[in-house]
Amino acid sequence: MFNLFSLQPAFGLDISDLSLKLIQLQKFKNEIKLYASNEMSVPAGYIVSGVIKNPEGVIELIQKTIKTSLGNKILTSNVVVSLPETKTFIKLIEISQVENKKLKKVIKEEISRHIPLTNEEIYFDWQIIKKITKNNEKKIQILVGAAPKNIVDSYTDILKKAGLTPQVFEIEACAIVNNLIQEKNDIPRIILDLGASRSSLIIYNNRTIQFSISISLSGEKITQKIAEKLEITLAQAEKAKKICGFDEKKCEGIIKEILEEYFFELLEEIKRILIFYKTYFSFHGTFKEMILCGGGSNLIELDVCLSKQLGLEVKREIPWIFKSQCFNHKKATWKSLISDFFFWPLFSKKIKSCPFSEDKFASFATALGLALRGIMEAEEQ
């Protein structure tokens, strides 16, 4: 791997227990376009709950994912990588206004009240959101992110051995928000990320993440339950889940019945989190909409079911970086639009069409957000 005169920005690499997802974006004539993508399955046991158990195997998979990228070749070693949601912490905190030289010390003291690890066990970073006056006291709102040192160090080690240079380690919730939300307004939003191996709920308000919570539901668990109840293979169960979803007219409603058990569990978790939000954050306003992402969000009629039960508008968002390109081609098909996102930055001709369908926007939400951070890092240099 090498850098070609820094012509390519860092690519995004989403590492999870079940898959590696790669996205690279390029800025061309003030438009951000999809330059390369890839996805590779991770064998069982290589990564467990975000912990790398087979470093050599993961290194080999990373190298293979890069070498076989769709669209264009990856000619940079710079990468922006996600850290596992279940191993990271992100929260908006408030502290009293202090001198800049005392800020880090005060933040470290405050972090210890929110994170079940000592300061010596974590790497942390922060971003000042805004200064406010509350109860006649001047305060600072700060978004704090933290991750265990052993997790970050293990990811750093495999990336370097794979020939890469990690520029940024991004908390997954931040990558998703960067990808899905651009509007400069104060609309409270819930983002539900339903992944194959893990899921999370992100509370976004006042132009920042308030907090993020992991939830127990995952696509893998649902597939396993379908396989067990119908006595079919996992591959058959996954196919049935995608084809039938919550549509009672498909598969004689059998898949819908199985999914409803997990749907109830999901609803209960969401409701508990919303009660917590209402109790401690109600002054920020009430939620009007929920955004779905992650591969599990593509279940047929999941958005309809959630909307009915929660009384919210539930939708799947197109990444904001692509919205203007899509809306400027009203007569174009999704297939042609996605094809147009791939391009040669140094030549006028187009490359071969790459398979990146509309439903992949949801499953590649984190990878797209990471790649967008790569663009931002390149512009700052």
Image: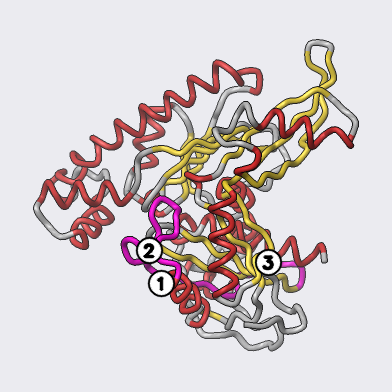
CA neighbours of label 3 inside 10 A, class few (<14), some (14 to 19), many (20+):
some
Instruction: Give amino acid for label 1.
Output: Gly
Q: Is residue 163 left or right of residue 244?
A: right
Q: In the rendered image, is residue 356 in sight?
A: yes
Residue carrying label 1: 57
CA neighbours of label 2 inside 10 A, class few (<14), some (14 to 19), many (20+):
some
Name the residue: 26% across, 47% down.
222
Identify the secondary structure beneath mark 1: helix
Is residue 52 positioned above or below 163 on the image? Answer: above
Q: Residue furthest top?
A: 135
Magenta part of the protein: which range?
29-55
Find out whether residue 164 is within the magenta segment.
Answer: no
Q: Quadrant of residue 280?
A: top right
Instruction: Give amino acid for label 2.
Output: Tyr
Q: Mark number for residue 46?
A: 2
Instruction: Give amino acid for label 3.
Output: Ile
Name the residue: 47% across, 30% down.
312
Sequence-earlier tag: 3 or 2: 3
The quadrant in which the C terminus is found is bottom right
User: Does the CB distance between marks 1 and 2 fall below 8 Å?
Assistant: yes
Q: Is residue 218 left or right of residue 371?
A: left
Residue carrying label 3: 32
| Marks 3 and 2, how far apart at CA | 34 Å
Q: Is residue 231 left or right of residue 293?
A: left
Identify the secondary structure beneath mark 2: loop
User: Does the CB distance between marks 1 and 3 fall below 8 Å?
Assistant: no
